[in-house]
Amino acid sequence: MTGADSVTAIVQEAMSRTADPRLREIMARLVDHLHAFAREVKLTEPEWEAGVDFLRRIGQASGATKNEAMLLSDLLGLSTLVVLLNNEQGRGETDAALLGPFWRDHSPPCKPGESIARDPGGGEPLEVRGRVSDLAGKPVAGALVDVWQASPVGLYENQDEAQPNHNLRGRFETDADGRFHFRSVRPKGYPIPMDGPCGELVRAQGRHPYRPAHLHFMLAKEGYKTLVTQVFADDDETIGSDVVFGVTPGLSGRFERAGDGHWKLEYTFVMQPGTRRIPRAPIP
Ligand SMILES: [Fe+2]
């Protein structure tokens, strides 16, 4: 018979015949932690109802172009935690960071030095020079470098009607020295979408909704673990308070003023051996 003291064990028993061992393990630990949490905070019935309603609205706010569930995971720091748990650190490899919701597969292949700013609509020019090496410091030649970034007003082209298709996206390949370079415009930091239940939560917590300005990179080559990361502008005022907790010390990039409003960014990416795996695009 179920009682407040016995319900956890009874639920565990009911789930114990789950055939898939990993599902069995994950659900058993989830129920343990979830029940312990409810006991610890002495969750009231109205609070539980509010929580269930919050999850219902997370689902309703999600659709073909918006994933509110992913946003919730990001805001709770869970997405960053999972990235860090699944990507080794400490051997000199570049930290991984969130893929984010705006990556698109099949962005245009570009020649070395080409500009990914397909919109002549201004912005401060930025020149990016990258170098890709392995753990021993040897260049990684022929790596695919997929780059995408927000515009000077802080919007990705797939959320902004005013930008041409594939603006501020491109694919490059490293040369024999593991180098690549391209031209662009400085991205602006941007707020996460605040019009859904996640926005309510951020406001209730007195948090600002901003991510510091950054460029996204995905580096891939057979024999290496695909590196999905972001390089942040070291002079952005929110670099110490990214709303989704993605900034690690190693991912702070030095944006240097080169005169005439031009900016330069140089960054070295270090890949580790492993499996080349291209993720599924969150939005096609
Ligand atoms: Fe981003």
Image (cartoon, grey):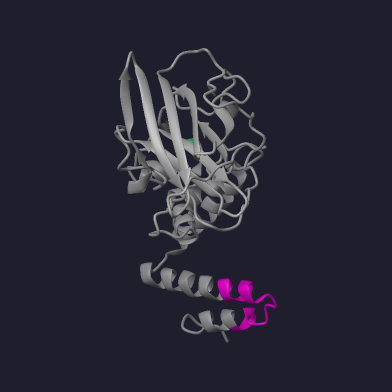
Residue 18 part of the magenta-drawn span? yes
x then y, percent, for residue 234? 31, 35
Quadrant in which the C terminus is drawn: top right
Q: Nearer the viewer, residue 159 or 33?
A: 159
Query: In the image, is 78 to the left or to the right of 57?
Result: left
Q: Magenta residues: mostly which secondary structure?
A: helix
The N terminus appears in which quarter of the rendering? bottom right
Q: Using residue 13 as the reference point, say whether residue 243 is left or right of it.
A: left
Q: Quick check: can you spot residue 209?
A: no
Location of residue 266 (image quadrant)? top left
Report the front residue among 274 and 249: 274
Say which residue appears at 60% left-offset and 55% top-offset. 223
Looking at this view, name the residue that lies furthest to the bottom: 1
Q: Looking at the image, which residue is at 67% across and 35% down?
A: 106
Magenta run includes residue 16: yes
Range drawn in magenta? 13-27
15, above or below 208, in the image:
below
